[in-house]
Image (cartoon, helix red, strand yellow):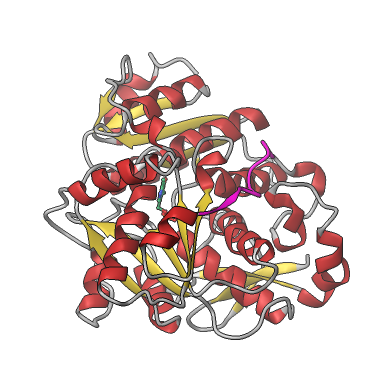
């Protein structure tokens, strides 16, 4: 195999395996590639003629046999220059990366294209995920396209349209009386008995690798000269980790050089453990109470790899900001009035950007990219209908017989 695991803490190498993501020492297992071999076929020149999906970087994704790739055309999303805003704000250049253009309306498509391709390679037939919404609908779409059975568990206040989207993609869909980690517990409790392959955040190596393509793609779209600042709405953190990891690999391949962009995580008031660690200059701690923000991709009080996210922000001289619900709502309108449809998460990057400009953290000569991770439409008011609400795996056993898949 031309790829394997390496632990980000103790450095130990181990064979690639689809069901692991943590080292015995507590570190995260990142996928490392035989870059000498990769560089034989992955060249800047050859990239020019490749498919306009994230699989243009297939040498840097952990799938051995191309025929196992499960793709709905994800990636290679537009990067739009925000000319009007550049006149208004003291910033050199500003772009929005339009991740809402992905097949399932959010950047989550990338992670699931890769995770389901790996699952496909290993012959997995039943997949499950806990999610605040977009991961669930992405899993449902990719699993169905690959002919796998999918089981999704989302908090009961998840936006109704996304719940219905999961049902429509053919997933066995459950609302959970709790938060995303409560939903995850149901999967952990049931996975042995039900044969579910858990595709939850950082439970397996595929999703972070798929999200890595955002970094690869950004570098290529910038003609291998990276911007100064990247603003990302952070929840579980695999977006930030993936982008950072992409830059490391591109450096090793000699595609890019110099300082990495300053990475910024934006979170919403009411669930902001990453911001707390950055502001207190402390180690990462999960948020254990007062989780009162809306159910968006940023509402993850207990990200499995908070330490790594915080260390990436520090290493790149980045930062983290909290924005309020009101600021996010205002930013959705502002983005809309500039022609960009933004979900609360995507809009949060705009709110974070304006705050950092005010604070003077973003400067006149900075080139900045905001990640619009999903579009507004999926979050419109809608009561999800006909989807059962449960709390435990035992509840699931009771009601699952009545749910058609
Ligand atoms: C999941 C999600 C996020 C958070 O991304 P992480 O990689 O988990 O930090 C941000 N925005 C949207 C729209 C999401 O669905």
Q: Position of residue 300 (x, y in %)?
A: 30, 54
In front of the other: 315 or 37: 315
Q: Residue at x 58, y 48 (%)?
A: 110
Q: Is residue 8 visible?
A: yes
Q: Which residues are magenta?
A: 71-81
Residue 286 placement: quadrant: bottom left
Q: Is residue 185 visible?
A: no
Q: Residue at x 27, y 79 (%)?
A: 283
Q: Position of residue 297 (x, y in %)?
A: 36, 47
Instruction: In the displayed orientation, state which residue is furthest to the left.
Output: 290
Residue 305 placement: quadrant: bottom left
Q: Is residue 267 left or right of residue 202?
A: left
In front of the other: 87 or 106: 87
When the figure is inspected, residue 229 is found, relative to residue 332, above or below; the finding is below
In front of the other: 63 or 229: 229
When the figure is inspected, residue 61 is found, relative to residue 31, above or below; the finding is above
Instruction: In the displayed orientation, state which residue is furthest to the front.
Output: 87
When the figure is inspected, residue 328 is found, relative to residue 217, above or below; the finding is above
Q: Position of residue 344 (x, y in %)?
A: 32, 44
Q: Is residue 254 left or right of residue 87?
A: right
Q: Is residue 241 magenta?
A: no
Q: Residue at x 42, y 33 (%)?
A: 152
In front of the other: 258 or 96: 96
> How many marks do you count on the picture?
0
Q: Quadrant of the N terminus?
A: bottom right
Q: Is residue 281 left or right of residue 128?
A: left
Residue 67 placement: quadrant: top right
Q: Position of residue 49 (x, y in %)?
A: 85, 53
Q: Main secondary structure of the magenta part?
A: loop
């Amino acid at each position: 195999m031309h790829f394997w695991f390496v632990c980000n803490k103790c450095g130990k190498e181990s064979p690639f395996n689809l069901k692991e993501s943590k080292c015995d020492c507590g570190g995260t297992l990142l996928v490392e590639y035989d870059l000498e071999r990769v560089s034989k076929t992955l060249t800047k020149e050859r990239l020019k003629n490749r498919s306009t999906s994230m699989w243009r970087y297939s040498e840097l994704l952990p799938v051995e046999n191309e025929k196992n790739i499960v793709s709905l055309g994800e990636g290679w999303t537009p990067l739009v220059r925000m000319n009007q805003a550049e006149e208004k704000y003291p910033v050199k250049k500003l772009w929005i990366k339009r991740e809402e253009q992905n097949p399932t309306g959010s950047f989550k498509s990338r992670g699931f294209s890769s995770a389901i391709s790996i699952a496909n390679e290993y012959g997995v037939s039943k997949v499950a995920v806990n999610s605040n919404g977009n991961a669930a609908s992405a899993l449902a779409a990719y699993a169905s396209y690959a002919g796998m059975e999918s089981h999704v568990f989302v908090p009961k206040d998840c936006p109704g349209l996304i719940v219905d989207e999961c049902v429509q993609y053919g997933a066995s869909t459950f609302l959970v009386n709790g938060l995303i980690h409560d939903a995850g517990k149901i999967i952990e409790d049931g996975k042995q008995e039900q044969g579910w392959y858990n595709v939850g955040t950082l439970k397996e190596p595929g999703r972070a690798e798929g999200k890595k393509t955002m970094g690869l793609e950004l570098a290529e779209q910038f003609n291998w000269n990276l911007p100064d600042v990247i603003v990302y709405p952070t929840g579980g953190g695999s977006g930030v980790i993936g982008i950072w990891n992409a830059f490391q690999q591109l450096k090793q391949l000699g595609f890019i050089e110099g300082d990495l962009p300053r990475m910024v995580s934006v979170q919403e008031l009411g669930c902001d453990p990453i911001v707390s660690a950055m502001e207190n200059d402390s180690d990462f701690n999960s948020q254990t109470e007062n989780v009162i923000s809306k159910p968006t991709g940023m509402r993850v009080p207990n990200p499995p790899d908070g330490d790594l996210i915080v260390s990436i922000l520090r290493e790149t001289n980045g930062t983290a900001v909290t924005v309020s619900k009101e600021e996010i709502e205002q930013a959705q309108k502002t983005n809309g009035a500039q022609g960009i449809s933004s979900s609360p998460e995507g809009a949060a990057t705009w709110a974070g950007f304006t705050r950092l400009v005010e604070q003077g953290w973003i400067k006149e000569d900075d080139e900045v990219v905001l990640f619009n991770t999903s579009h507004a439409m999926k979050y419109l008011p809608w009561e999800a209908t006909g989807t059962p609400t449960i709390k435990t795996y035992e509840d699931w056993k009771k009601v699952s017989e009545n749910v058609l898949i």
